[in-house]
């Protein structure tokens, strides 16, 4: 299991993303020099989140996504695991077991995505995956 530094701050960021009264749309965890996970950043803009996904980075991101239609808006959540293309095979392998620690905190999400290419990290792709996972999506057609 991955060691987490300042688990309280991580839980607080998670709850902030889930809070409908908060502007915070995402938070991300990164591995530090001691190979522990820590809260790296929180934010509002999707492009700011995407900027955290470097070629040699391992990141767990929790993202709020607005779904629904003109009749009902709903907030759903996505867990994104980023493994940069320059991450070693050993570190990639460790992430598969360490993700269990992350899921103990980021426990409520509609979709989980593994990304290793920035071309796959697009807001519309993630939103479509969340909507597809949610089932029926009714609208008035207007």
Image (cartoon, rainbow, N blue to C red):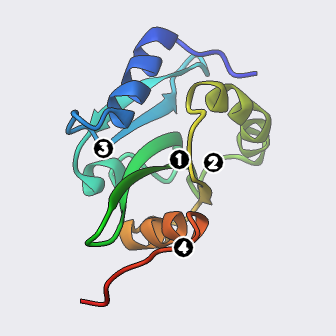
> Which residue carries the number 2 mark?
87
Q: Which residue is mark 3?
A: 25
Of circles 3 and 4, the one toward us is: 4
From where the camera sits, is residue 80 visible? yes
Compute the Cα span from label 2 to label 1: 5 Å
| Residue contact at pointers 2 and 1, CB within 8 angstroms | yes
Give the residue at x 40% y 26%: 15
In primary-sequence order, the first of circles 2 and 4 is 2
Q: Nearer the viewer, mark 1 or mark 3?
A: 3
Residue sitting nearer the eye, 64 or 114? 64
Q: Which mark, residue 56?
A: 1
Task: Answer above or below: position of 137 versus 19.
Answer: below
Give the total of numbered labels: 4
The answer for how far apart the CA atoms under marks 1 and 4 are is 38 Å
Q: CA distance from mark 3 to mark 2?
A: 27 Å
- Residue occupying image coordinates x 71% and y 38%: 95
Residue labelled with disc 4:
136
Residue 132 x, y percent position in the rendering: 56, 72
Residue 70 locus on image (x, y percent): 26, 72
Are there few (<14), some (14-19), or many (20+) residues within 10 Å of tag 4? few
Distance from disc 3 to disc 4, alpha carbons, whole Å, reads 24 Å
Label 3 element class: loop
Q: Is the N terminus in the top left, top right, bottom left or bottom right quadrant?
A: top right
Secondary structure at numbered mark 4: loop
Find out whether the residues at labels 3 and 2 contact each other: C-beta distance under 8 Å. no
């Amino acid at each position: 299991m991955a060691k987490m530094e300042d688990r309280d701050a991580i839980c607080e960021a998670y709850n902030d993303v889930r809070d409908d009264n908060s502007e915070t749309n995402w938070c991300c965890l990164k591995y530090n020099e001691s190979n522990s996970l820590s809260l790296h950043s929180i934010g509002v803009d999707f492009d700011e989140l995407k900027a955290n996904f470097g070629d040699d980075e391992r990141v767990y991101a929790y993202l709020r996504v607005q779904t629904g239609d003109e009749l009902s808006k709903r907030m759903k959540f996505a867990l994104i695991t980023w493994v940069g293309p320059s991450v070693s095979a050993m570190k990639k392998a460790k992430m598969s077991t360490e993700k269990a620690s992350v899921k103990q905190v980021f426990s409520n999400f509609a979709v989980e995505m593994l990304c290793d290419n920035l071309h796959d990290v697009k807001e519309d792709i993630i939103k479509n995956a969340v909507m597809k996972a949610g089932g029926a999506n009714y609208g008035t057609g207007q």
